[in-house]
Amino acid sequence: MPFSRAELAAFAGRTLPDLIPQPTRLLVVGINPGLLTVAVQAHFARRGNRFWPAMYRAGVTDRLIDASKGFDSDDVRHLEQRGVGFTCIVPQATARAAELTPSQLLAGAVALRERVATVRPRVVAVLGISAYRVAFDEPHARVGRQPRDWDAAQVWVVPNPSGLNAHASLDDLTSAYREVAIAAGIEPYPG
């Protein structure tokens, strides 16, 4: 189901529903959805994105999920059974997260905190330190567990899996995602 650039551009500004099971142990927070992600209605849909390979290698999933054509219902059930949920700071799709304004990130952060208070996950894992610093007005934040919890949820910032984040290797992503899964009480599958 390949899309032309023009077809993908038509998805700018559209949204992707959250995937939030009950209970949620680990709430994965992307910056905002990409155009393909919204087009196929599946989180981290771009094949070049390293998110799903890192989740598989980290033992969070028992299989390599391919979301490039949308989620398979068995994959959704698997994620729900593991207590893994997905949302974004900013719900509107863009071609690149760099297109977002600081005001969009700040407004998205307020809405995210409200979702966390309702969902009550054990761990919130925000993917991307630069966006986290702007959205939550924490200019000196570092990757890893943050000093303040949100409504009893541990807050972690982990590397963004985008290929544009070249300084974080697949091994770095795998290690970080395994750490937050364990903190959330998700026992990793043997690797």
Image (cartoon, rainbow, N blue to C red):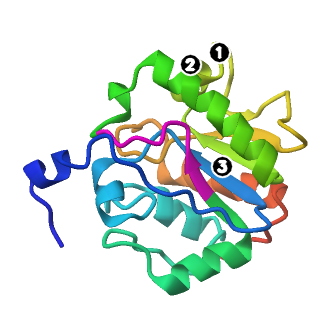
Q: Residue at x 31, y 73 (%)?
A: 69
The picture places residue 29, in percent across and down from the top left corner, at: 59, 46
Task: Give the SS element for disc 3.
Answer: helix
Residue 89 among magenta residues: yes
Image position of 108 with respect to 11: above or below: above
Residue 71 among magenta residues: no
The picture places residue 51, in percent across and down from the top left corner, at: 48, 57
CB under 8 Å between discs 2 and 3: no
The picture places residue 15, in percent across and down from the top left corner, at: 40, 49
Task: Give the SS element for disc 1.
Answer: loop
Q: Is residue 189 visible?
A: no
Main secondary-structure element of the magenta-colored stretch: loop
Magenta-highlighted residues: 86-94
Which residue position is annotated with label 2?
134
Q: Residue at x 56, y 25 (%)?
A: 107
CB under 8 Å between discs 2 and 1: yes
Numbered label attached to residue 137: 1
Q: Amino acid at mark 3?
A: Ala
Q: Earlier in the sequence, mark 2 or mark 3?
A: 2
Which residue position is annotated with label 3?
176
Indicate left or right for 75 with 124 as reference: left
Q: Amino acid at mark 1?
A: Asp
Q: Is residue 141 visible?
A: yes
- Mark 3 to mark 1: distance in Å? 23 Å
Q: Amino acid at mark 2?
A: Val
In the rendered view of the protein, which quadrant contains the N terminus? bottom left
In the rendered view of the protein, which quadrant contains the C terminus? bottom right
- Mark 2 to mark 3: distance in Å? 21 Å
Image position of 68 with respect to 81: above or below: above
- Front tag of 3 and 1: 1
The picture places residue 169, in percent across and down from the top left corner, at: 48, 47
